[in-house]
Image: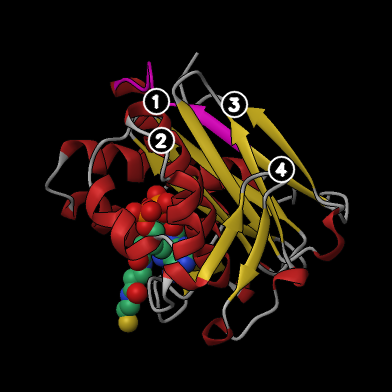
Amino acid sequence: MNPASNVVDVWWAPLEGFDLPSQGTALALLDESEMSRYHAFRAHGARIQFLAGRALVRQCLSRYRALQPTDWRFCENAYGRPYIADACGVDGLFFNLSHTDGLVAFAIGSFREIGVDVERRDRQTGIEELSETVLASSEKTQLAGLAGAAYREAFLKYWMLKESYLKARGVGLSLPMSSVRFDLAGSPPAALFDPEIGDCADHWSFRLLTLTGEHIAAVAASAPGGSLTVRPIETSLVQA
Ligand SMILES: CC(C)(COP(=O)(O)OP(=O)(O)OC[C@H]1O[C@@H](n2cnc3c(N)ncnc32)[C@H](O)[C@@H]1OP(=O)(O)O)[C@@H](O)C(=O)NCCC(=O)NCCS
């Protein structure tokens, strides 16, 4: 099965209840290289997010093709972006993964470039420092009258949209985020790219999603024309 040509499915799973038995089930899905990455994490939270993310990727991919979750193989580009290895014999299926405190999300579609970013709505870390370097001057002007939670939420929308684009491109943080600009006045958000991005915003569609009371997501896809449908689908990593 392929997602319809103008659709990105966003499978997401809360980490609440992802207990030891559920973690054991997830661990059994990982390949050797994922296992070594899992064991290399020092921080428990990051290790669990990695495990949950990779289990979600494997389980969800198997909903679209007749491969078992353990059968998927992945390669990475020079910036660490995982994609489905040719050895899987799968054409026309592209994905991206994001995790944050309490939730993992997996976006899939037939667009070559797909990016997803999830954040907690109440994220505090780094907002002031990031605002300076990440926002374009037009965006700073938009945020000028806001303070506290209102500022944080608006900033996060810009941040996540920019991240979703960079993740879709798979180029890490090698492009200047302040040159990828958004106008949040309308829905969906409108993008404008400065020349150094070397890309045309008309070739892209962006969406913002509310996943839970605490978590929001941004999705980018190389889908021109604004006809993109993004379907959020809740799933579970918790063993019944
Ligand atoms: C892409 C990136 C910005 C996302 O970071 P983040 O917001 O903290 O994390 P998220 O949870 O949203 O996404 C992480 C997931 O994105 C995917 N990912 C990793 N690198 C990616 C990239 N370059 N592009 C798109 N997705 C990427 C992975 O699936 C990763 O999860 P996993 O490691 O558990 O598989 C960050 O991983 C990054 O900067 N990578 C680039 C590093 C780089 O430039 N290296 C250059 C080496 S030459």
| Nearer to us in this view, 202 or 240 | 202
Q: Bounds of the magenta span?
A: 11-19
Residue at label 3? 235
Q: Residues within 10 Å of mark 4 (few under 14, many from 20)?
A: some
Identified by mark 4, the residue type is Asp
Residue 9 image label: 4
Up the image or down, 130 lies above or below 68; here it is below
| Distance (Cα) linking label 3 and label 4 | 12 Å
Residue 146 image label: 2
Q: How is the image coloured?
A: secondary structure
Task: Answer with the quarter of the image where residue 11 lies.
Answer: top right
SS for tag 1? loop
Residue 222 image label: none
Q: Residues within 10 Å of mark 3 (few under 14, many from 20)?
A: few
Identified by mark 2, the residue type is Leu
| Distance (Cα) linking label 1 and label 2 | 32 Å
Identified by mark 1, the residue type is Leu
Residue 201 relative to residue 48: left or right:
right
**Which one is closest to the eye, mark 2 or mark 3?**
2
